[in-house]
């Protein structure tokens, strides 16, 4: 059972009038579902309750209609009508004794109000600060507005109580919540009693907390999420000023929830931020207050968690991503199953669900946000179907996840892998600069598979269709991955571009195999995710002079969705990479490339000894097509099904591959859904006309 070293993580602790059963604290996190998918979001929180979290929060909940962040999809508590969907969530959170928390957000200078068309209100009249630079300004709150806003907070607190919550988190971190906007001199330039001195800037939060405490404080705990450091220079709310603020207001909330000043800083990917990256900013704050403190830092190791509590740095271990990657993390610590923890890899794919207003995925946990939509439980599989065994071909993320899910259903599984090591692209990519944590995708599954009697892994076993037909497996699962194209076909070029025969062309696969070009190297990035930027880093570190050309306006454009684009640009700039934006490549000669402006078509040459083509990938589906061509012989060979999935079906991020592998395993031997939708959804109820 539980290692006594971790006992401290299971000690109950009071937060105002309520008590958390342990120190595992799921801080608020988005999921891309929000008000559009209330039952999907509620069930996801319920799974965390089952997984043992002591405190579980909602994502940010827009507490009044005068401040909302459309197009992003969070929760809303604008009127009584919103209560039932929030009550569904709180009920799920409380199923196993967790405290249910709601994060009340008034977005102020961060809310453009594109949906409600209300004029945004903020401490000072400034342009709205969002990812999209909306051409909208806020007006400054008048004294009457401030009184209204205080009342709206009380209304929201009372509705939160009616919705069944135990805790209220007031949002003032990440640049998103009005409490930060009042505290920071950058966004609060008022000359009345709400601006100027720190005492004045802290007046609003003091008033709101006093009001809420009067209204619901006898039964609900009030937490304040504040920025550890706004990191925007002199005017910003610095770590020193935060400490001063906490010292001056020692017992203001029932718990201090400390998070970095921008979301990008707080949820930095593993490529740029280690576990416990905020430790220095947090250390010593607990001594300034008698209230408990929670902090975050992509904690996945119970040793680090226990150290945080034992050293007096934190009282609660705040987790968002680690609780997504493994909703059962606390339970696994409690049951002494540390090696079963599915550690977050810090890729930030989960965040892309919010940023793209779709619905979140997790690379490590393919069941995330499918708990209600598909009935997928992260720890339990559906029972086995009619057939008995599966040959999985390819041990990349898709094949490994399929095998792991299949063996839990009770199938006998054999995995054939052409290479002498498993992990496919994950193994190769985890050797690139900054991506070592990605190896956890392989490590978790490898460990689990090796514990199972019904799984065999065969390395160095590249299979042909004829061999597959001889083996006598009933189900053939093809997860043979994809190969980076050499001909430049992607978005700019839908057919191969002109390339001189003497040109030295490399693909990411070449570089990952250790074949690195030197001298003047042009990276042509028409892929737009992380690969182009990572390879630039690799090549510079190997001594090359690198120019990265991309038709996009941003280097590694799609990483805007993983909150790392700005850091990647800065890193490449620091390394001396010449970044060429808004330009494509029209032709490759032996010693230069011809680059075109995407707007005007005007061309310019860039000298190059070699080109790295980060374009698109081609499915490795020859084996699949060979088997399909022999469909008439399947019955004689004992084959019932042949399926291709993951990158071998259509290339995508690693999370798409683990999802595809998991889905294959869930659906094997299942009913044919025909034309029906493969998941549940909710649609808006029509109002009476
Ligand atoms: P995915 O992301 O879809 O899992 P990967 O490229 O990461 O794809 O993994 C595919 C794996 O399949 C690689 O490790 C590759 O070596 C292996 N593979 C490809 N073709 C064969 C084959 N014919 N037989 C066995 N293994 C194969
Ligand atoms: Fe962690 Fe990536 Fe999963 Fe997010 S998507 S929880 S960062 S593994």
Image: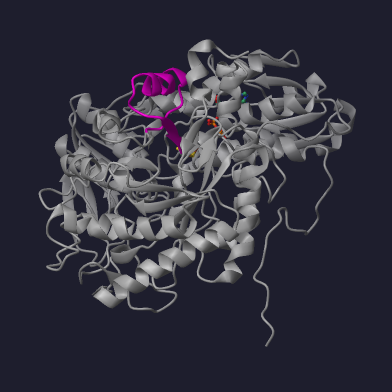
Compare residues 585 and 451 and report the one nearer the observer.
451
Span of residues in magenta: 297-319
In the rendered structure, the answer to whether residue 214 lies left or right of residue 626 reads left
Residue 524's place in the image compared with 424, above or below, is: below
Task: Based on the picture, tell me whether residue 6 belongs to the magenta stretch.
Answer: no
Any part of residue 37 in sight: no
What percent of the width, then of the height, locates residue 389? Answer: 80, 24
Residue name at image x 55 percent, y 57 percent: 161
Q: Seen from this angle, which residue lies furthest left?
A: 234
Residue name at image x 60 percent, y 64 percent: 83
Q: Quadrant of the N terminus?
A: top right
Compare residues 79 and 263 and report the one nearer the observer.
79
Dividing the picture into quadrants, the one containing residue 256 is: top left
What percent of the width, then of the height, locates residue 152? Answer: 42, 69
Dividing the picture into quadrants, the one containing residue 405 is: top right
What percent of the width, then of the height, locates residue 267? Answer: 36, 41
Task: Based on the picture, tell me whether residue 301 belongs to the magenta stretch.
Answer: yes
Q: Dividing the image into four equal quarters, which quarter contains ligand 1?
A: top right
Q: Seen from this angle, which residue lies furthest bottom?
A: 689
Any part of residue 248 in sight: yes
Compare residues 122 and 249 and report the one nearer the observer.
249
């Amino acid at each position: 059972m539980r290692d006594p070293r971790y006992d401290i993580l299971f000690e109950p602790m009071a937060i105002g009038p309520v008590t958390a059963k342990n120190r595992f604290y799921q801080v608020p996190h988005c999921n891309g579902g929000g008000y559009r998918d209330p039952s999907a979001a509620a069930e996801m929180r319920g799974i965390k309750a089952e997984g043992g979290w002591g405190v579980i929060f909602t994502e940010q909940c827009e507490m009044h209609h005068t401040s909302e962040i459309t197009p992003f999809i969070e929760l809303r508590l604008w009127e009584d009508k919103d209560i039932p969907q929030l009550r569904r969530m709180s009920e799920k959170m409380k199923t196993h004794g967790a405290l249910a928390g709601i994060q009340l957000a008034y977005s102020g200078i961060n809310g453009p109000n594109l949906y409600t068309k209300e004029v945004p209100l903020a401490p000072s009249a400034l342009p709205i600060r969002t990812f999209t630079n909306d051409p909208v300004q806020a007006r400054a709150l008048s004294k009457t507005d401030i009184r209204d806003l205080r009342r709206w907070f009380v209304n929201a607190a009372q509705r939160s109580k009616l919705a069944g919550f135990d805790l209220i988190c007031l949002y003032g971190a990440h640049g998103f919540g009005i409490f930060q906007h009042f505290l920071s001199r950058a966004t609060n330039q008022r000359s009345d009693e709400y601006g100027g001195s720190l005492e004045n800037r802290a007046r609003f939060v003091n008033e709101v907390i006093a009001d809420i405490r009067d209204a619901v404080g006898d039964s609900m705990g009030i937490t304040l999420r504040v920025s550890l450091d706004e990191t925007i220079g002199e005017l910003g709310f610095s770590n020193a000023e935060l400490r001063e603020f906490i010292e001056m207001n020692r017992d203001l909330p029932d718990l201090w929830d400390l998070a970095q000043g921008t979301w990008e800083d707080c949820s930095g990917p593993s490529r740029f931020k280690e576990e416990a990256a905020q430790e220095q900013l947090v250390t010593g704050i607990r001594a300034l207050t008698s209230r408990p403190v929670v902090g975050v830092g992509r904690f996945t190791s119970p040793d680090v968690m226990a150290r945080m509590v034992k050293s007096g740095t934190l009282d609660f271990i705040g987790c968002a991503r680690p609780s997504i990657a493994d909703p059962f993390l606390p339970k696994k610590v409690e049951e002494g199953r540390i090696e079963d923890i599915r550690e977050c890899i810090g890729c930030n794919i989960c965040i892309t669900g919010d940023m793209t207003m779709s619905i979140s995925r997790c690379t490590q946990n393919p069941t995330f946000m499918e708990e209600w939509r598909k009935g997928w439980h992260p720890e339990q599989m559906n029972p086995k179907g009619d057939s008995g065994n599966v040959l999985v071909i390819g041990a990349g993320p898709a094949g490994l996840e399929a095998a792991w899910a299949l063996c839990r259903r009770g199938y006998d599984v054999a995995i054939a892998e052409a290479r002498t090591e498993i992990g496919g692209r994950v193994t190769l990519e985890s050797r690139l600069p900054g991506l070592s944590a990605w190896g956890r995708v392989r490590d978790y599954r490898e460990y689990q598979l090796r514990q199972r009697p019904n799984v065999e892994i065969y390395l160095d076993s590249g299979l042909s269709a004829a061999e597959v037909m001889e083996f006598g497996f009933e189900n053939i699962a093809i997860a043979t991955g994809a190969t980076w194209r050499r001909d430049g076909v992607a978005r700019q070029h839908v057919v191969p571009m002109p390339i001189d025969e003497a040109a030295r062309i490399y693909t990411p696969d070449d570089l990952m195999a250790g074949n690195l070009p030197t001298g003047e190297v042009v990276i042509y990035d028409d892929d737009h995710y992380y690969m182009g930027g990572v390879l630039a880093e690799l090549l510079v570190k190997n001594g090359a002079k690198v120019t990265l050309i991309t038709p996009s306006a941003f280097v590694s454009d799609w990483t805007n969705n993983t909150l790392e684009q700005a850091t990647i640009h800065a890193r490449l700039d620091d390394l001396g990479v010449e970044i060429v934006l808004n330009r494509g490549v029209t032709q490759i000669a032996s010693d230069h490339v011809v680059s075109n402006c995407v707007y005007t078509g005007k061309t310019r040459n860039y000298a190059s000894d070699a080109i790295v083509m980060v374009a698109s990938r081609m499915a490795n589906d020859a084996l699949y097509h060979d088997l399909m061509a022999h469909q008439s012989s399947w019955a004689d060979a004992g084959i019932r099904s042949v399926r291709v999935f993951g990158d071998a079906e259509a290339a995508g991020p690693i999370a798409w591959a683990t999802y595809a592998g998991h889905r294959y395993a869930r659906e094997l031997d299942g009913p044919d859904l025909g034309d029906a939708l493969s998941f549940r959804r909710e649609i808006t109820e029509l109002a009476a006309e």
